[in-house]
Image (cartoon, coloured by chain):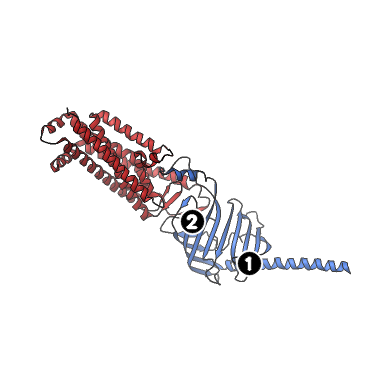
């Protein structure tokens, strides 16, 4: 198993598309920072316009924390999209090139092979989110500095700089869980569909549907607390004044459950179906 | 004879009401002079907001006042300071000539104070009428309710930490404020819709309050 993991990591490192994907993620991140800067000014003007008649404002709200928060809002669509394409490619390319048949000729069990793929994909996703977070914090704080964060969650919540930074870190941690979920789904789709283009289309459709359903409002307990599109948005809960820790833990556990479920489906299908 | 008595009674009533009005004017004038004698001051300000649609932690700022100039603030963090209610020396109130109307006495927190209305005589004044509760014994204002021409009515309640303080140490500013209205969701994707629905029904004018605590006063009086 250890050798399999090493081989999978080696394959991921050697393939050029990994670096194209990572470059795309950081390029998007940079674009989003620029967009967030301009959008940030407009949003602050809109949010505070009603208050300008009654209050003087001292201090800067367009700071690194706001930029990271805006970035998180936008990033959670672009990042899984690229991750899903990259992850699906790790298996579909093996189907396409016929390397999978060669590997399967070796005395390797199928479940160990696919499990090592899942493990490496999860590791890669976590490293990518970590790198994104580091660059995100680095760029935002270097250019825009620190300061209080304002978010609108039914009420205008002003969060002190150090607490905002802490909440943003937690948001990234929860975001990492979501990204792992999407990566695992993508690999499972690759197991089912085997072909690159089909897998990418279905993966993109899955992501778009997830985003649409996340915004769709339904007064239903299962839909709001057990259905995965809603769970992926749980990182926002950290920005309430009174953080609903119980709800966050619940959502995280359910999301991990979905991830394991998708992984088991992928494992089972890969083991049962013929290669070739 | 009866006609003379009636005439005397009328004179007495007119005289006594004129004396009372003069007393109120004198008392207010003493307060005005006392506040006017402040050349500058600085203080440490602690601010708490009580507005339904704003969640903000307690904020700290340093406050600087120089007579004839707008207040200046200094803070290492983001602070929202009310435009109304920070006129501790009542510069705006006494800026133009005014008429004082005595409204008798009023009890607040077991203390009796004189209630007066201040009506500016100049159209340039920002406010239409201000009703003050004044502590004539200690020459200071306890409460003011000011009806502005453009920004509605706001009330200021002041308490002082010592008997001889000219400036308040604790202030509550109560006012009406327009709720934040957003055409679409900005800066967030709400996860708990019950919160969104609640806030959606509360659009419009809301009652708000700001609690200010002032410490470390450094006051310079005109010599």
Q: Which residue occupies 50% across, 43% down?
A: B200
Pointer 2 chain: B
Residue B116: x %, y % from top left: 65, 62
Q: Which chain appears blue?
A: B
Rendered view: B177 above or below B114 = above
Task: Count residues near mark 1 (Cα–Cα under 10 Å), then give few for <14, some for 14-19, many for 20+.
Answer: many
The residue beneath circle 1 is B113
Q: Which residue occupies 86% across, 68% down?
A: B4
Query: Chain A takes which shade in the image?
Result: red
Contact check, label 1 and label 2, Cβ < 8 Å: no
Residue B65: x %, y % from top left: 51, 63
Task: Count residues near mark 2 (Cα–Cα under 10 Å), then give few for <14, some for 14-19, many for 20+.
Answer: many
Residue B193: x %, y % from top left: 44, 43
The Cα–Cα distance between marks 1 and 2, rounded to whole angstroms, is 28 Å
Q: Are marks 1 and 2 on the same chain?
A: yes
The tag on residue B49 is 2
Rendered view: B219 above or below A270 = below
């Amino acid at each position: 198993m250890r050798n399999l993991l090493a081989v999978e990591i080696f394959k991921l490192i050697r393939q050029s598309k990994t670096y194209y994907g990572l470059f795309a993620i950081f390029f998007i991140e940079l674009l989003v920072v620029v967009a967030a800067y301009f959008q940030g000014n407009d949003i602050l003007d809109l949010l505070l316009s009603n208050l300008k008649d009654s209050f003087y404002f001292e201090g800067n709200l367009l700071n690194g924390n706001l930029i990271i928060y805006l970035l998180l809002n936008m990033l959670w669509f672009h990042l899984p999209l690229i991750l899903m394409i990259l992850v699906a490619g790790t298996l579909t390319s093996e189907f396409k090139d016929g390397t999978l048949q060669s590997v399967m000729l070796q005395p390797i069990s199928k479940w160990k092979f696919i499990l090592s793929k899942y493990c490496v994909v999860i590791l890669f996703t976590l490293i990518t989110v970590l790198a994104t977070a580091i660059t995100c914090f680095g760029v935002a704080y270097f250019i825009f500095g620190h300061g209080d964060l304002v978010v609108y969650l039914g009420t205008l919540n002003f969060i002190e700089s150090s607490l905002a930074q802490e909440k943003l870190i937690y948001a990234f941690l929860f975001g990492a869980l979501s990204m792992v979920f999407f990566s695992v789904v993508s690999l499972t789709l690759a197991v089912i569909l085997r072909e690159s283009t089909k897998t990418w289309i279905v993966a993109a459709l899955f992501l778009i549907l997830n985003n649409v359903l996340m915004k769709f409002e339904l007064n239903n307990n299962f839909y709001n607390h057990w259905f995965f599109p809603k769970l992926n948005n749980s990182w926002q809960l950290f920005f309430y004044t009174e953080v609903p820790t119980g709800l966050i833990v619940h959502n995280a556990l359910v999301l991990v459950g979905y991830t394991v479920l998708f992984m088991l489906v992928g494992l089972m299908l890969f083991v049962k179906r013929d290669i070739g | 004879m009866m006609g003379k008595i009636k005439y005397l009674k009328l004179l007495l009533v007119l005289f006594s009401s004129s004396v009372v009005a003069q007393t109120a004017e004198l008392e207010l004038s003493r307060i005005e002079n006392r506040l006017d004698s402040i050349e500058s001051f600085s203080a440490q300000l602690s601010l708490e907001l009580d507005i339904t649609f704003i969640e903000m932690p307690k904020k700290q700022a340093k406050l600087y006042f120089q007579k004839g100039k707008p207040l200046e603030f200094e803070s290492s963090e983001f602070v929202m300071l009310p435009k109304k209610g920070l006129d501790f020396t009542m510069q705006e109130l006494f800026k133009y000539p005014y008429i004082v109307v005595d409204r008798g006495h009023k009890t607040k927190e077991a203390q009796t104070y004189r209630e007066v209305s201040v009506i500016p005589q100049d159209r340039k004044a920002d406010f239409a009428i201000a009703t003050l509760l004044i502590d004539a014994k200690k020459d200071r204002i306890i409460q003011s309710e000011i009806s502005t021409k453009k920004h509605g009515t706001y009330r200021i309640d002041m308490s002082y930490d010592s008997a001889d303080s000219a400036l308040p140490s604790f202030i509550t500013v109560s006012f009406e404020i327009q709720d934040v209205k957003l055409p679409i969701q900005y800066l967030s994707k709400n996860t708990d819709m019950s919160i969104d629905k609640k806030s959606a029904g509360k659009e419009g004018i809301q009652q708000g309050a700001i609690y200010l605590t002032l410490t470390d006063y450094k006051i310079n009086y005109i010599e």
